[in-house]
């Protein structure tokens, strides 16, 4: 219980730092939402009235404390441009971004786990070298460049998959998945290398343990040794990396949703930055930070579940 309270306390501090930093940064952005509302023909007095009405003339700290007080009561505020509830704007787009992140993570694991096992089993062999080279090539390429290459090859050249667009799940499973494959693959091709390298390194160490030699001496097949005895104890770091990748995937969706025309929360954030809709920007960033700290909290719990030594240390700590 003490451990959980300590973690929750740290998570709240992180959220306060992130939200206040965002408020400060957004406040110094060039441009003014009052001009977006008033239009190009608005006079200076009309712009001043709009700023006064929106509360933009108050000091940043006062505005932040007011926003924080409303957030503590469950009120995420309303868009300065449209008046829509920020929470409703976010929650409508969350399933789309989560689907993209989940697909990307599944694809990354589907590539990384077999590649990591093969690389550890035949460390420094020709197969390991090919996998490592492919991994370095993928991680060295920016995500947007990977996306452009995939669009050119699979959409423009082969015509197999759409280059942009989104279909809801109500339109059918394949209709929904088809436009999501290339964006998810763009994210996965950047992320799988880190997972593969982590798993490979852990498995090489595990395969040198005495109990692995004993399993082999008993005549167990290589497949059973690798999957039943070496994979689980080698996956602790992999689970930690999966949690840390959430932040990278969230950042990746912001760019890729724009490239592929996916109406997720990343695209909402980009639009809010263009229009200087401060409350929407603040809401999106807060949601990203909240998701990140919750996922890392769950990763900590999973780590303790996977490793009994961590569980015992925390119980006595």
Image: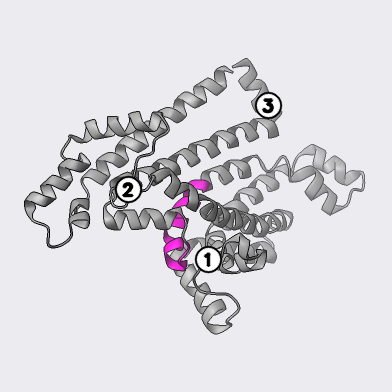
Q: Which residues are magenta?
A: 246-262
Residue 166, which numbered label?
1
Query: What is the C-alpha distance between the residues marked 3 and 1?
Result: 46 Å
Q: Closer to the N terminus: mark 1 or mark 2? A: 2
Disc 1/disc 2 C-alpha distance (Å): 26 Å
Q: Looking at the picture, how far across and down is residue 179, in whole percent?
A: 56, 68
Is disc 2 placed on a helix, strand or loop? loop
Q: Residues within 10 Å of mark 3 (few under 14, many from 20)?
A: few
Tell me if I can see residue 2 in this picture. yes
Instruction: Using the image, tell me which numbered label, if any, was put on residue 83.
Output: 2
Judged by depth in the image, the label closer to the viewer, 1 or 2, is 2
Give left or right: position of 303 versus 98. Answer: right
Nearest the viewer among 296 and 227 is: 296
Q: Nearer the viewer, residue 224 or 37?
A: 37
Between discs 3 and 2, the one toward the N terminus = 2
Occupied quadrant, residue 191? bottom right
Secondary structure category for the residue under label 3: helix
């Amino acid at each position: 219980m003490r451990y959980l309270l300590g973690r929750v306390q740290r998570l709240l501090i992180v959220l306060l730092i992130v939200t206040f930093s965002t408020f400060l940064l957004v406040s110094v952005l060039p441009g003014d939402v009052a001009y977006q509302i008033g239009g190009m023909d608005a006079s200076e007095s009309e712009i001043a009235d709009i700023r006064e009405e929106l509360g933009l003339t108050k000091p940043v700290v006062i505005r932040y404390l007011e926003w924080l007080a409303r957030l503590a009561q469950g009120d995420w505020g309303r868009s300065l441009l449209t008046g829509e509830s920020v929470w409703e704007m976010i929650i409508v787009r969350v399933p789309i971004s989560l689907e993209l992140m989940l697909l990307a993570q599944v694809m990354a694991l589907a590539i990384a786990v077999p590649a990591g096992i093969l690389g550890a089993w035949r460390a420094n062999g020709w197969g390991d070298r090919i996998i490592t080279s492919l991994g370095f090539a993928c991680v060295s390429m920016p995500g947007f460049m990977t996306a452009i290459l995939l669009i050119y090859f699979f959409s423009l050249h082969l015509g197999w998959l759409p280059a942009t667009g989104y279909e809801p799940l109500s339109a059918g499973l394949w209709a929904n998945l088809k436009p999501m494959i290339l964006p998810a693959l763009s994210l996965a091709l950047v992320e799988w290398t880190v997972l593969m390298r982590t798993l490979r390194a852990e498995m090489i160490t595990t395969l040198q343990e005495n109990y692995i030699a004993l399993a082999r001496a008993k005549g167990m097949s290589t497949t059973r040794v690798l999957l039943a005895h070496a994979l689980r104890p080698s996956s602790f770091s992999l689970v930690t990396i999966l949690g840390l990748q959430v932040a990278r995937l969230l950042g990746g969706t912001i760019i890729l949703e724009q490239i592929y025309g996916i109406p997720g929360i990343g695209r909402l954030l980009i639009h809010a930055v263009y229009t200087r809709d401060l409350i929407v920007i603040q809401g999106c960033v807060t949601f990203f930070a909240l998701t990140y700290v919750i996922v890392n909290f769950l990763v900590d719990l999973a780590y303790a579940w996977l490793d009994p030594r961590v569980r015992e240390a925390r119980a006595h700590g």
